[in-house]
Each structure stands twice: as structure tokens, then as C-alpha cells.
Amino acid sequence: MPCSLLWLAYRTPELRHPKRKEIAETILKTSPDELHINARKILELFRGSLQSIVANNGAVDMRLYITMRYVACTWRADTSEMEGIMNLISIGVVRGSSQISLALLDARVSNVKDPQ
């Protein structure tokens, strides 16, 4: 879900895009407890904007657009960062045995990479 939030910053805000509408609908209809932490923050801060995206067939208001545009421009996803995450996954699989669930592996990697 976190990467799909970047669709909210796609092209220009007045562009009616079905993927933005789909993302907004998904966030609005999903229980906050089941949302990724970043999607939950978007829901809490921009509920009205998300409802507006759905009502306007994918056009987004400037407040949410500018926020997500900033995130898209500053998101660090370089090779070194990805290799670090892959290394954490490899370590998690080795230490957790071959029977580790994807949810548990995701939680372990997330705790190491982004402790809250």
C-alpha cells in the first residue's frame, strides 16, 4: 500500500485518473486497523480529500496533491536502500526457518528498518 499512495501525486491534480479513485476508495472502505500506517495517516488527515477524489472521479484537491507530491519527490528508494532491505529479508528467512510466514517476515523487517 505505501507505494500505491504515490498515485495520489500522479501528473496534475485536476486530471481525473481511475487509479487515484481506486486508491481513495480502498482507503475509505478499509478498516483503519487493517491499513498500513501511512495509509492510516492519510485517512486521518485527508478524509475529506479522499471523499472528494471519489466524487470527482480521480481528481485530487491541491492540499493532498501537494503533500503527496512532496513525498514523491523526497522518497529515497536508491539501490543501496533496496539492497539493505533485501539483506534484512535474507537474514529474516535464515533465522526464522523456511516456515516463516510473509506477515511475520514483513513485521520483522519493518521493525528493524523503521522502528516506531
Image (spheres, grey):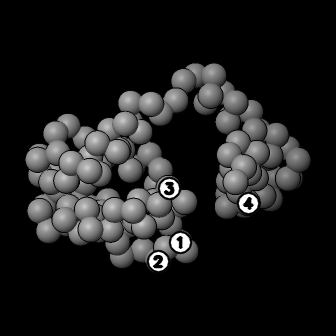
* Residue type, numbered disc 3: Asn
Residue picked out by circle 2: 31
* Residue type, numbered disc 2: Ser
Tag 3, which secondary structure?
A: helix
Residue picked out by circle 1: 34
* Residue type, numbered disc 4: Leu
Tag 1, which secondary structure?
A: helix
Res 67 → quadrant: top left
Residue picked out by circle 3: 38
* Residue type, numbered disc 1: Glu
Instruction: Estimate how packed mark 2 is, as few (under 14), some (14 to 19) or many (20 or more) residues with alpha carbons within 10 Å.
Output: few
Q: Is residue 82 visible?
A: yes
User: CA gap, disc 1 to disc 2?
Assistant: 5 Å
- The image shows residue 110 at horizontal and vertical percentages of 68, 49
Mark 3 or 2, closer to the camera: 3
User: CA gap, disc 3 to disc 2?
Assistant: 14 Å
Tag 2, which secondary structure?
A: loop
- The image shows residue 25 at horizontal and vertical percentages of 29, 68
